[in-house]
Amino acid sequence: MNFLTILPLAVVMVAGTQVVAAVLLASAERPRAASLGYLAGAGAVVVTGVTLSWLLTRALRGPEARAETDVVRFERTASRIDWAVLALLVVLGVVVYLRRHRTGPPRWMGRLRRADPGYALRLGVVLVATAPTDDLTMAAVGASVARHDLAWWHLLPFVLLTLGLLAVPLLILLLARGRAATALPRLRAWTDRHGWVVSEVVIAFFALVTVLDLVESSRRG
């Protein structure tokens, strides 16, 4: 496994309310300032979430596992982490499926048209930190990277891609200019209809990678 394997899970992070909020902020009275505040808040939570999961998994593995002084114990610990990641992915898939009909922005998002950078920053923190799908995804990403004994920086491409996807509405605003008024509502509508399907495909892919790791570990054991 390498850091490229976890990148598709960035799609799961943003599919749903998160990208809808990004679209609405890109249509606000101060779109650039509000969008940047939103990205800062979301980015802070994503970095914190994956880092905590990475640190916790490394701590659970213990120094003897990282040093691989005891091969049998190392493989057993790695397999347990794989099973934990797989369980997280199964729960994540169920949560995404159960929430598939929750389309459209909540009523409180009507405030976003007049959002200032401070409000947008707090919104980014709250939306990512309280979303079950995001919490489960960050836990799975951090644990998987630590399980494969990859350095912390391998988490950064996932963080950057997540923020890049959330920045798409702002990029559309900056690049499309006059056409943004049409493009942004289309992006929001497409995400409402198909976002959960894309998320399930990505989750299934990462689950398959984890299962292959388990098979490989059992062969070595």
Image (tube, rainbow, N blue to C red):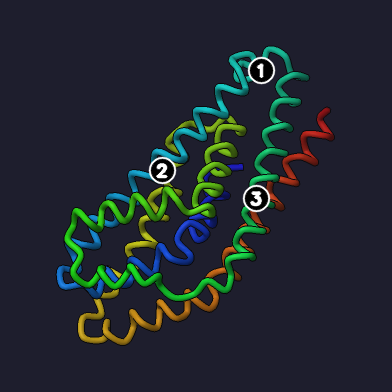
**Amino acid type at image mark 1:** Glu
Quarter of the image with the N terminus in it: top right
**Amino acid type at image mark 2:** Leu
Q: Which residue is mark 1?
A: 68
In the rendered image, residue 119, in percent from the top left (x then y), is placed at: 22, 56
Q: Are marks 1 and 3 in contact (CB under 8 Å)?
A: no
- CA gap between label 2 and label 3 equals 20 Å
Helix, strand or loop for disc 2: helix
10 Å neighbourhood of mark 3: few (<14), some, or many (≥20)? many
Q: Does residue 77 appear to the left or right of 55 in the view shown?
A: right
In the rendered image, residue 116, in percent from the top left (x then y), is placed at: 17, 61
Q: Does residue 117 appear to the left or right of 190 in the view shown?
A: left
- CA gap between label 2 and label 1 equals 26 Å
Residue 107 higher or lower than 127, as above or below: below
Q: Residue at x 18, y 65 (%)?
A: 32
In the rendered image, residue 58, in percent from the top left (x then y), is placed at: 56, 25
Specify which label sits upstream in the sequence, 1 or 3: 1
Residue 89, numbered label:
3
Judging depth in this view, the residue of 203 and 114 nearest the camera is 114
Judging depth in this view, the residue of 83 and 98 nearest the camera is 98
